[in-house]
């Protein structure tokens, strides 16, 4: 298998990028859009070996890609550590290649770090979570260097905000947003 070319990521001056996978990207996007200091969230695919994948290909689990959200944030307002705190609290990082009924490597828990600092922070927090047995099972979140990101099709962008009435949104996405509001209300951009 050939390595994909590294995709260019334009990072606005004074900002940082985080690329996180935590199951369905509609969930990740909906959670992180609501945090103060987050300026942009784009749903897409990362960590695989197929260039420019389509949703249907990622869903069949054969591209190696995870569903992720790429988050542009202002580190003067919200730190990478703070993002990871929300990340680990709003999904189950102890299940390998699944979140609830969503099963397959495309739903894995993953952090695709953009710098040595992000790598060190992610590993440190993961080790601390496991050492303190915060979860009943070990955290299996993949921590891998970022290499590529492909934005998902337009209909996946801003999905929960536009389709919150749909059953999947009500039963899967909304509980994660509700957990964010309950445990991180002081970090919300707008109180809903």
Image (spheres, grey):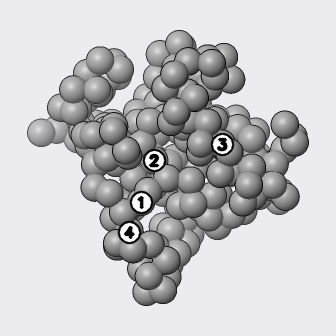
Cα–Cα gap, marks 4 and 2: 12 Å
Cα–Cα gap, marks 4 and 3: 21 Å
**Which disc is residue 93 wearing?**
1
Which mark sits nearer the N-terminus, 1 or 2?
A: 2
Q: Is residue 3 visible?
A: yes
Q: Residue furthest bottom?
A: 131
Cα–Cα gap, marks 3 and 1: 17 Å
**Which disc is residue 139 wearing?**
4
Secondary structure, mark 3, is: helix
x and y, in percent, of residue 177 in the image: 65, 42
Return the residue nearer the eye: 117 or 79. 79
Which mark sits nearer the N-terminus, 4 or 2?
A: 2
Q: Residue at x 84, y 58 (%)?
A: 186
Q: Quadrant of the N terminus?
A: top left
Q: Residue at x 34, y 73 (%)?
A: 138
Check whether the beta carbons of the residues at disc 1 and disc 4 lie within 8 A of each other: yes
Secondary structure, mark 2, is: strand
Secondary structure, mark 1, is: loop
Q: Is residue 75 visible?
A: no
Q: Residue at x 50, y 36 (%)?
A: 172
Would residue 165 be found to the left or right of residue 91 on screen?
Answer: right
- Circle 4 packing at 10 Å, graded few (<14), some (14-19), many (20+), is many
Check whether the beta carbons of the residues at disc 4 and disc 2 lie within 8 A of each other: no
Which mark sits nearer the N-terminus, 1 or 4?
A: 1
Q: Can you identify the residue that label 3 sits on?
A: 177
Check whether the beta carbons of the residues at disc 1 and disc 2 lie within 8 A of each other: yes
Q: Can you identify the residue that label 2 sits on?
A: 22
The residue mark sitting in front, 4 or 3, is 3
Would residue 71 be found to the left or right of residue 107 on screen?
Answer: right
x and y, in percent, of residue 180 in the image: 68, 51
């Amino acid at each position: 298998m050939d390595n994909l070319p590294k995709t260019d990521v334009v990072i606005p001056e004074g900002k940082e990028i985080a690329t996180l996978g935590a199951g369905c990207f509609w969930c990740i996007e909906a959670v992180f859009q609501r945090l103060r200091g987050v300026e942009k969230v784009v749903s897409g695919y990362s960590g695989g070996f197929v260039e420019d994948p389509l949703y249907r290909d990622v869903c069949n689990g054969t591209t190696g890609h995870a569903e992720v959200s790429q988050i542009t944030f202002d580190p003067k307002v919200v730190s990478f550590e703070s993002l990871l705190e929300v990340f680990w609290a709003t999904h189950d990082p102890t299940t390998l290649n699944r979140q609830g009924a969503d099963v397959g490597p495309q739903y894995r828990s993953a952090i695709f770090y953009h710098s040595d600092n992000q790598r060190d922070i992610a590993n440190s927090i993961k080790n601390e979570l496991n050492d303190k047995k915060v979860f009943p099972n070990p955290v299996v979140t993949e921590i891998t260097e970022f290499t590529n990101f492909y934005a998902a099709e337009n209909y996946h962008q801003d999905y929960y905000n536009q389709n919150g009435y749909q059953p999947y949104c009500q039963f899967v996405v909304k509980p994660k947003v509700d957990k964010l509001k309950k445990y991180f209300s002081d970090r919300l951009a707008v109180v809903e």
